[in-house]
Amino acid sequence: MPTVIISHEVDDVEHWLSSPKREEIFGPVGITVRTFIDPAKTNCVGLIVEVPDMDTFQRMMESEAAADAMKFDGVRPETIQTLVES
């Protein structure tokens, strides 16, 4: 099961942390997520994501549902960085 690290900025860290959208989007396809925040209180956040396969993850990230969830969560799409376990 591949591991992916994602970092990005959000408009409101507390809103992002409390959002149900990650579980709603990722849970049904077997993707698990752990969240991280910057202790310096910036708007930079991160995720460690365990995916069943990269094709499923890629399709999910390109979906309209994922775009809607990111918008709801206040994700700043231009700041997204994704690292894939090698």
Image: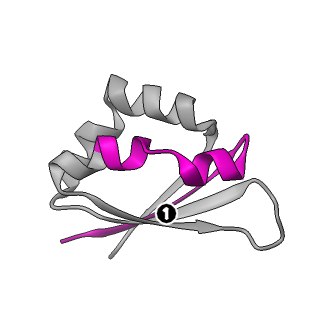
**Is 78 left, or right, of 70 in this rendering?**
right
**Nearer to the camera, 37 or 59:** 37
Magenta-tinted stretch: 1-25
Q: Visible in this render: residue 26?
A: yes
Q: Position of residue 78 (x, y in %)?
A: 63, 37
Q: How many marks?
A: 1
> In the image, what residue occupies the spot 72% across and 68% down?
38
Q: Is residue 80 visible?
A: no
Residue matched to label 1: 47
Question: In the displayed structure, does residue 57 sit left or right of residue 9?
Answer: left
* Image vertical order of residue 65 relative to residue 26, above or below: above
Residue drawn 16% across and 58% down?
A: 53
Please state, as top left, top right, bottom left or bottom right, where the N terminus lies in the image.
Answer: bottom left
Q: In terms of image quadrants, where is residue 25?
A: top left
Quarter of the image where one finds residue 21: top left
The residue under the point 56% across, 51% down is: 18
**Quadrant in which the C terminus is drawn:** bottom left
Classify 10 Å Cα crowding around label 1: few (below 14), some (14-19), many (20 and above): some
